[in-house]
Image (tube, helix red, strand yellow):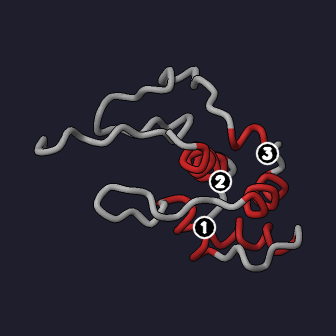
Amino acid sequence: MSRSECAAVRIKALRQQLGLTREQLAGRCAQVGAPDITASVLVNIETGRPRNGLRRRAITIDELAYLAKALNVSENRLLHEQTCAACGGSPPKGFTCNACGFSQPDEEGAR
């Protein structure tokens, strides 16, 4: 997982743990000096704007700094993979861990 993907997973998980909507997190970003991080930008950061299964949207260093401040965590916490106590960093295929937000896609062709 790339640093950008890792940060995106953690941003979404922290946002959800705090019970924030994307609109509310965007409001917090505006309060800390980043009005350009809108709810739409957060969708793109969290999803990566995938095409053909590839992430097309990376998070910038500036966005990372503002999002860390808005979420009241260190930038390091958003960047570095930490083993989740609930799933061990590897939830079953097709599931998303409720604790860390990491997901394993279904195998291709599996239903």
- The residue identified by callout 3 is 75
Amino acid type of the residue that numbered disc 2 sits on in the rendered structure: Arg
Q: Is residue 9 above or below residue 43?
A: above
Q: Earlier in the sequence, mark 3 or mark 2?
A: 2
Q: Which element type, helix, strand or loop, lies under badge 1?
A: helix
Which-is-in-front pick, marks 3 and 2? 3
Indicate the position of residue 84 as horizontal and vertical percent values.
57, 25
Task: Judge from the rendering whether residue 80 lies leftward or rightward of residue 52; answer left or right.
Answer: right
* Closest to the observer, 31 or 57: 57
Check the image and report above or below for 40 versus 55.
Answer: below
| Residues at marks 3 and 2 touching, judged by CB atoms closer than 8 Å | no
Tag 2 residue: 15
Name the residue: 37% across, 56% down: 54
Which sits earlier in the primary sequence, circle 1 or circle 3? 1
* Front tag of 1 and 3: 3
Q: Which residue is mark 1?
A: 42
Q: How many marks?
A: 3
Instruction: Give me the C-alpha separation between circle 1 and circle 3.
Output: 16 Å
Q: Residue at x 31, y 42 (%)?
A: 105
Q: Residues within 10 Å of mark 2 (few under 14, many from 20)?
A: some
Q: Residue at x 46, y 63 (%)?
A: 56
- Kind of residue at disc 3: Glu
Give percent across and percent down for residue 19: 65, 54
Q: Disc 1, disc 2: CB below 8 Å?
A: yes
Residue 81 screen position, x and y as percent: 62, 32
Label 3 to label 2: alpha-carbon separation: 15 Å
